Amino acid sequence: MSVIENLAIVLALCALLSLISYKFKLLTLSGSAASFIMGVVIGAFGSINWLIMLIAFALAGFVVTRYKIDVKMRSGLQEGQKGERTYKNVFANAFVPALIAVISYAAGAQNQPIAVLAYLCSISVAAADTIASELGVLSPHVRLITNLKKVPAGTDGGISLYGTFWAVMAAIFVSLAGWVVLFPGMAIDGRVFVPIVMGVFGCMVDSLIGATFETWKLVDKLGNNVSSMAIGSVVGVAILLSI
């Protein structure tokens, strides 16, 4: 496939996702524009398969966001007015994957396993955190990660067994699906456990930052998400280089 053909497919996929997201009020207009931009960056500098994984994560995020949205709205725990997300949410979850794509392209390594797995680690963290957050707020048993004291659902840094279970499931699903999509035809090996573990680890880092720096107003939600995804990816790469 030529560069022009590849770019045309990337543009078409990103445009379709953005339009559908806006039409069904999953993203605001700013969110749809941001998703198009970030998708193009990832698809152009990474690959179409990298973009497919981003789209799969986005769709999973939309599903859990709308799950029991009426319950979330009654408690004031929804994103936006009815679960829609803005450009800030999009950049929070796509900045690190996009950065990995650009750096990998600049190094001529976007097809190297270490770059692909670093990207998968970032998506795994995003998926684990998003799904844990959207489903965890439905749990009546939420505790602060720093001292395990019971706190209201939706509290920054709050964790629950229910939310953690779904974080683990999300990390496993994304990592296994990612391996199939990003390493087509390659048998699954022990390296697949790295993005699984990093997904859950990054989710916990997000909660820890939420209970401390975010609560202290030193970072906002966007900064928290970017930091936890970056940490998950960097630690993942360090582990991969050591084995």
Image (cartoon, helix red, strand yellow):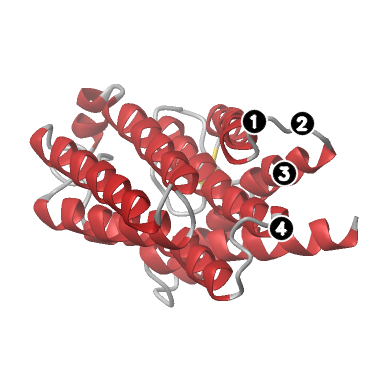
Q: Position of residue 1 (x, y in %)?
A: 43, 47
Nearest the viewer among 216 and 11 is 11
Q: Which residue is mark 3?
A: 197
Label 1 Cα crowd, 10 Å radius (few <14 / some 14-19 / many 20+): some
Indicate which disc, 4 or 1, sits on the residue closer to the N terminus.
4
Q: Residue 114's mark?
A: 4
Residue 21 vs 67, above or below: the answer is below
Nearest the viewer among 140 and 228 is 228
Q: Between marks 2 and 4, how big is the CA–CA gap? A: 15 Å
Answer yes or no: is residue 93 visible.
no
Under mark 3, the amino acid is: Val
Dot in front, 4 or 3 = 4
Q: Element type at marker 3?
A: helix
- The residue at 12%/32% (across/down) is 24
Q: Which residue is mark 2?
A: 188
- The residue at 18%/51% (across/down) is 32
Q: Between marks 4 and 1, how big is the CA–CA gap? A: 16 Å
